């Protein structure tokens, strides 16, 4: 995500959807990285998630407190499970990763939210 100008970031996050009956699972991990120039990236947080059998549809904010210098770019990478686990009716099929909205909080305490052209958080 290109922020338009350099900002100090204090918190990053990604809203994720889980709907296991539709083969949609939390990601297995989410990595947050920042860059001043879009070329050299620094990973500022990595969050691991656990898989549990749960038929309820839900959303979850995967977030981390971070301290950065002024950065202009934020990168979010959500890694999926690879194949549906045994607890899924479609075990061994490809699951759908469903990232939502990327969030980050700057020095002024204002949450900034952006989507890429496809409507999926970058």
Image (cartoon, rainbow, N blue to C red):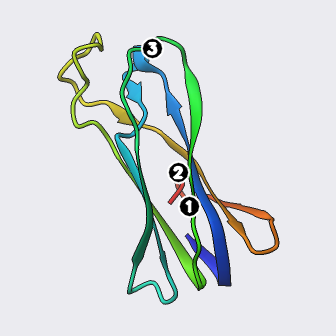
Label 2 SS: loop
Q: Which is in the foreground here, disc 2 or disc 3? A: 3
Q: Residue at x 80, y 65 (%)?
A: 110
Q: Is residue 18 above or below residue 62?
A: above
Count the numbered circles shown: 3
Disc 2: which residue: 120
Q: Residue furthest left?
A: 92
Mark 2 and mark 1: Cα distance apart in space? 6 Å
Query: Residue 54: which numbered mark, if any?
Result: 3
Is disc 2 in contact with disc 1, using a CB cutoff of under 8 Å?
A: yes
Q: Residues within 10 Å of mark 3 (few under 14, many from 20)?
A: some
Q: In x, y percent, where is residue 38?
A: 45, 84
Q: In x, y percent, where is residue 93?
A: 21, 24
Query: Residue 116: which numbered mark, if any?
Result: 1
Q: Residue at x 39, y 40 (%)?
A: 27
Q: Is residue 6 above or below residue 67?
A: below
């Amino acid at each position: 995500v290109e922020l338009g100008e350099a900002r100090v970031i204090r918190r990053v996050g990604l809203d994720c959807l889980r709907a296991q009956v539709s083969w949609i699972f939390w990601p297995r991990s989410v990595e947050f990285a920042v860059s001043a120039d879009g070329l050299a990236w620094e990973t500022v947080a990595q969050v691991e998630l656990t898989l549990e059998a749960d038929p309820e549809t839900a959303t979850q904010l995967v977030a981390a407190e971070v301290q950065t210098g002024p950065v202009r770019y934020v990168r979010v990478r959500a890694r999926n499970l690879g194949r549906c686990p045994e607890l899924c009716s479609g075990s061994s099929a490809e699951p759908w990763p469903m990232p939502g909205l990327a969030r980050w909080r700057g020095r002024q305490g204002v949450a900034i939210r952006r989507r890429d052209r496809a409507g999926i958080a970058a």
